[in-house]
Structure formats: C-alpha cells, structure tokens
Amino acid sequence: MSNAYLLDIIIISLATALLSFVAPKIKLPAVVGAILAGLIIGPSFLGLLKETVFISEIAQIGVIFLMFTAGIETDIAAMKKVGKAGFAIASLGVLAPIILGGWVAYLFNDSVQDAAMLQNVFVGVVLTATSVSITVQTLRELGKLNTDVGNAILVAAVIDDVLGLICITVVSSLVNKTVSVPVVLLKIVAFFALAAVTGKLAQMLFNKMGKWLDRRTINGPFLMVHVLCFCFGMAYVAETYFGVADIIGAFLAGLVLRTTPLANIIDRYIQPVSVVFLNPIFFANIGLTINLHYISPTLLYLSLALVAVAVVSKLIGCGLGAKLCGFSFKKSVQVGCGMICRGEVGLIAANKGMELGLMPSNFMPAVVVVVCATAIITPILLKIVMPDTATDMSVHDVAKWTSNGFRKLPGVLPRAIAVRAFHVHSKL
Amino acid sequence: MSNAYLLDIIIISLATALLSFVAPKIKLPAVVGAILAGLIIGPSFLGLLKETVFISEIAQIGVIFLMFTAGIETDIAAMKKVGKAGFAIASLGVLAPIILGGWVAYLFNDSVQDAAMLQNVFVGVVLTATSVSITVQTLRELGKLNTDVGNAILVAAVIDDVLGLICITVVSSLVNKTVSVPVVLLKIVAFFALAAVTGKLAQMLFNKMGKWLDRRTINGPFLMVHVLCFCFGMAYVAETYFGVADIIGAFLAGLVLRTTPLANIIDRYIQPVSVVFLNPIFFANIGLTINLHYISPTLLYLSLALVAVAVVSKLIGCGLGAKLCGFSFKKSVQVGCGMICRGEVGLIAANKGMELGLMPSNFMPAVVVVVCATAIITPILLKIVMPDTATDMSVHDVAKWTSNGFRKLPGVLPRAIAVRAFHVHSKL
C-alpha cells in the first residue's frame, strides 16, 4: 500500500490553512480561500495533486458532517415559520434556471438531433440543483446561520433538492421508458415518511442513551458511534434507496438530534475533526476537480454564459420568491445570493444526462466550471450583501459553532467560571 | 461515486462498539472485542464487507494517531532510563524468532531449491517485527502505559523496528545485489539524525505558535493543522525516504510535541475522532484482512506452528532481555507478552520476500494468520499477567488518556471546580 494519501492530506491541509487564514485579511470569506487553495494546488496551477478516490470520499464525509451540524444548529420551529417562503423560493428558483439555462443551451447547442430541444431543457434542469453547503459555511462565518434568511435558505435548499430530482426524472422519463415518474414521486414521499418515523425512534433511543450516559452505564464515545451511524445511515439510505441527496439525509439526522440533549456532546466529538481535517478537504476538493488547462475559447464563452445564467437565475428566481413572501428587498437579495451555489447534485445529473444522450457532451466541462465558479462567487456575494458582525479568522475557526454547545455549561458550573472556561476553551 | 464506504463505516462502527462493549464483561480486553468484530463481519464469517483501499487508509491513519498519541504520553526521561534494557529486549527479541522461526520453516518448507536455507532464515526474519500498537492500546486500557514496563516495551519496539529492517536488508542483499546493506544502515542513521533536527525545529515552531495562540493571533484549529501535518509528515518521510515504519515516525513526532505546551490541545482535537472513528476501524481491519475459509488442514498446522513460535520466541527472547537488565521475573514476563504482537511490518517484509523468491509461497497466508492471532493473543496475555487497576468499559473509552491533558487544568480553575469539570468532561 502506498502512503501517498498522507502527502495529499499534508498538502491540502497546509494550503487551505494558509489561504483561509489570508483570505479574510483581504476581505474575502475564508471558505473562498480554501476553495482557491484547491484550485492552486490542483491540476489547474501547481499540479501538486489531483482528485483521488480517497480525497473524494473524505470530502464527502466532510460535507455530510457540514450538513449534519447545520441540522443540529437549525431550530425546527423557526424553519416551520419560513416553510411557505421556502417553498416559493425553491419553486421560482427551479423555474428560472430551467428557462434561462435552456435558452443559453439553445444558443450554444449545435446538435441537429430531434432531441436538441429536450437537451436544452435538460441543461436548464442541471442548473436547478442548489448546493447549500458552501452557503452554510459562509453564514456560519458571518454569524448568520440562525436568522430568518438562514432558515429560509435551508428550507428552500431541501425543497429545491426534491423539486430538482422530480424535474430530472420527468425529463429523463421522456427518453428512457424505464424511468417512471410516479415511482420517483412515491420514493420521495416514502423517504420523508421513513425519515419522520426513523427520526421519532432515533429521538427515543438517544434520549434513553442520554440517560444511560448520565448514569455512566455507557460512555460518550460509545454513544457517539451510534450518533455517527445514525447520521451516515440517513445519508446512505437517502441516496442509495430513495434517490434523495445524501446531504439531505444528514441534515434531517441533525434536525432530529437537535431536540435531544446530546447536541453539545456531538459538538465536542464531531466539530474538532470537521474543522481541522474534513471541511478543508471538502472545500479544497471543489477546486481540485477542475483543470483550467482544458478550457478552450469556445468552452470559455459557454462556461461564462452558463455561470452568468446560474448566478442570475437563482438571484432573480429565489429573490422574487422571497420578496413575494414578505421578505424585505435586502433580505430577498441575501436569500437569492445564498441559493446560487451549485454542487455535486448538478454534476451527478449531468452525468446521468450524458448516459441518456440528454446532455450535449461539450457542456459537461462547462458544468464543472459552474460548480467551481458558483462555489467561489456565492460566499463573496453573501459577504457583500450581509454585513459581517463576527470577527472570524479562518475557515478552521470553531468558536462560533461551539457556542451552541457551551450555552449549556452555566447550569453545571457557576456562571463566572463558565465564562472563564469558555475563554479557555475558545483559545484551545 | 458510490457511497458504499458509508455503509462499511456504519457496519464496522456498530460491530466494534458492540463487541468492545461486551468483551470486558467477559474479562476480555476491549481491543480484542474490536478485532473479533472485524473477523466476524469480514469474509471469514458474515462476509458483510471486505478490506477496501478506503478502509485500509483510514485504518492506517488510525494507527498513526495511536502511535502519535503514545509518543505524546511518553516521558522521554523515563524512556532514557530504560534505554539499555530496551536494547537488550529488542536484540534478544529479534534473535529468538530468527532461530525458532527458521527452525519451523525448515520443518515445513518442501522447497528443493538451493535457496531453501535462506528462505527458512527469511521466515524467521519476518517473525521478528513487533507491532506495538495493539500493546499500546491494551496498556492504556489497563492504565499501565506510563510504567517502567510500558516504557521498556516502547523503547524496545522502536529498536526492534530498526533491527528488523537491518535483518531484512541483510538477507535480501544476499539474493538481490541491488540491495545494499551500507546504504540502508546509512539511511537509518540519517533518519534519526533528521528526526532530531526536525524535532528541535518543530519544538521551536510550536512553542512560538503556542504563544501566538495565547495572544489569539491564531486559533486552535489553525495550530492543529500544523500539528497534524508534522505528524503525517514524519510518518510519510520515515517510510517513503528512509524505509523506517511510518508509525515510528509518528511516535517520534509525538515525543517531540510532548515537550511543548500543546499536549492537551492535541488531546482535544485528535482524541475524539481517534476513539470514536479511527481506532475502531484500525482494530477491525486486522480481523478483516483474514479469510478463514482459505485455511486448509496443512495450512492450519503450519499456521499453528508459526503462531506458537511467534508467541514463544518473543516471550523467551524479550523476557530474557528484560530479566538480564534487572527487571523482576513478573515484569520480564509482562515485557515479553507486550512484544508478542506482529503487524503490517511483517506482512510488508513477507511480500518483499515473495518478490525476491525468499518466501515460500505457502507461508504467506500463515503469516497473515500470525498477524491476526498475535493481535488477539497479546492483549489477552497482557490482561492476565497485569492486574487491571482501571475500570474501563470499552475500546472507545477516553477518560484515561485525556487525564493527561486535564492534569493541567488546575492552574486555570480552582481545584474543586476542576475536579468537577473533569467529571462532567468524562461523562461526555
């Protein structure tokens, strides 16, 4: 067994640490520094390393934890309050990219097949899938995850994933008779039903385990193994059996655990490895997937057009959705910016489209550019439209999202000591 | 990308949690439970999963962290005190397996080549390499890592690795003229010289970073990234450029950091992921590597003979070494037991031997059995010869090895509160 993966980890860790430390000094979000680090050390510039299966799988665990902890930090009551708005945001945010994306595809698609029209629509569909993970990290950095805008974005992202899945299925079913729309719809309903039931059972189990923990019948790590398996299990089942993105499964798992008394224990075990090790790899991996050397002039124009459409369509679609539901203009723009980022769901859809002949082959690299570019643009725009109230230093900073866990300390220790302990803790 | 690796992690995590929880209830060390979990879910019994590259690489990171934290917990002054004893233990512990292993190989080797004699010696050499990781975990479980016996075992294991490497090189050089003994010796000397210099520099760097941390110029995770890279870097460089085992590099990295004021920060960031996630995968992976279905009667006898020789030779060799250096009979037996475990170094040596024609091919599966069997036998014997003063519950327990970090708290908080905080902490 070669141990080259160790070297990969070293390179990624040092590069992301450096750039996400420097980025905020020049007013860029730290997460952009981490993505740029991947771009620079990757095949596009230095060529120090390329995407490997190991790095991708670690990155995937990183984004699963990212969404899992986002779930833990999300207040379900607050989410319900923005439920209707989330639906409007997601719906218009799906419609706009289909229309605008389809139009750009029409301009650039030189296919003479009968399927050209369907291909154009499919390109639009590929552009519908918002990837909320980068936004979550940026909102955390800005201290805005637990706001009405943050909640609206999270709700809309979940609904967006479902709507996107339905759109892909509908278009695919037109060329592939084995794809059945009712089956997919049924699967989606079944998944959320299953998630509700499993969530209820998991809540009971973990409440019981919390009591065992108090009585010291079991210990923290033993409990954490079960929490971890619940999170991974939800992610795995969602994607493997129901076609729903794994990060949605992880997010729901987090929502469930929010209501148990374990949230700060989870912070203690999952957060250190996430911030030091997993999240940086996930962010850098986005930059690693792209090789700018392959970009020809034609591809460049196509990519620029798709990126522009990707940004504008979500900004208009989601922003309009938010505005219609009573958000102020400023907040509507914030919501629109937060939904811009595309991710792996788009890539998976594009790959599936290639197999079915629904995706013009010259569009594939452009979709990769869209994923990478929106991952960089989203946090920059968010930082511009959201005044930063926090004082973070790097993507590795944890002080803010442990505060959730530490809020519970004062019950155990006298308040003055607890505050002291918090300072000691946040120095660590 | 398939997400089957998530399912693998779930299965391994639940199985190791369950069996390492149950094992102590029937007086077995928890680590044995974890290894047996791997054996049971692996191809030998349930066949739920097999070794994958991802699992192996995660396991490798697990053992690197295991040895890194062992280094952090090791008192260099105490190690120096047992330096001479360590040398005697390692030397006799290398000599005995060569003689006894060579003799068993002679009995079972039906090769008629001229090289048969050399082959037999090589089998003996393969049996020399002690793998100390399982012992480290067991000593932790028993609360005996920081004792004269624990230190003697650690010192001897480092020397053992070097001696084993020299033996393999010497024998290989007899059949392969490109292998040069002086070059290998030079490399080993160069590695330890480099480690000393790098260690000194790293110490200065991390002392400085510790001060930056106090002044909040940097944060904990940013510092931890550098610690992690130092650990991985030492492991990578040791194995890739100097032929020394990566875990020796990680152990030395830990020794270096022991003397900086960062030890408890490292505990906070590395220990949670190690105990919940990485270490269980490492232990289970040992059980996964073997498939008992492939064991024919002939192979069974050969395996039993090699396992017996592996156990007896270290027990006699290392035990005698310890006795000669003034250890009591009881402690000498403890040292002997602690050195029994063989690991990946033996497998790598055996593979290299196969390439050079130095390893009879029917011996290879038997070596795998030796690795797996000694990993199970070592902790059981250790628990028998060392009365347990601790009250651990599972391999996932952390209370004991965080105590190192928490010893430093009383300087910050009043003692009574610190004790209280420790109890709260160990409940988490």
Image: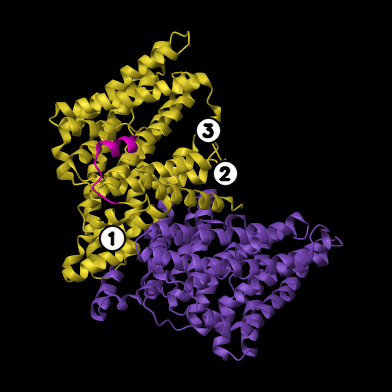
Chain colours: A yellow, B purple
Residue at point 17%, 35% (across, down): A83
- Up/down of A265 relative to B124, above or below: above
Whether residue B342 can be seen here:
no
- Residue B156 in the image, given as x and y percentages of width and height: 61, 77
- In the visual, does A296 lie left or right of A82? right
Q: Amino acid at mark 2?
A: Leu
Nearer mark to the viewer, of 3 and 1: 3
Mark 3 belongs to which subunit? Answer: A
- Residue B78 in the image, given as x and y percentages of width and height: 53, 83
Mark 2 belongs to which subunit? Answer: A
Magenta residues, start to end = A378-391
Q: Amino acid at mark 1?
A: Ile
Quick one: label 3, few (<14), some, or many (20+) residues within 10 Å?
A: some
Circle on res. A291: 3
- Residue B189 in the image, given as x and y percentages of width and height: 69, 69
Q: CA distance from mark 3 to mark 2?
A: 12 Å
- Residue B111 in the image, given as x and y percentages of width and height: 81, 61
Quick one: label 1, few (<14), some, or many (20+) residues within 10 Å?
A: some
- Up/down of B408 relative to A228, above or below: below
Q: Amino acid at mark 3?
A: Asn
Residue A386 in the magenta stretch? The answer is yes
Mark 3 and mark 2 in contact? Answer it, CB < 8 Å: no
Query: Which one is earlier in the sequence, the residue at label 3 or at label 1?
Result: 1
Query: Which one is earlier in the sequence, the residue at label 2 or at label 1?
Result: 2
Badge 2 is on which residue? Answer: A48
Badge 1 is on which residue? Answer: A265
Circle on res. A28: none
- In the visual, does B182 lie left or right of B425? right
Query: As rendered, which of A423 and B27 lies closer to the eye?
Result: A423
Q: Secondary structure at mark 3?
A: loop
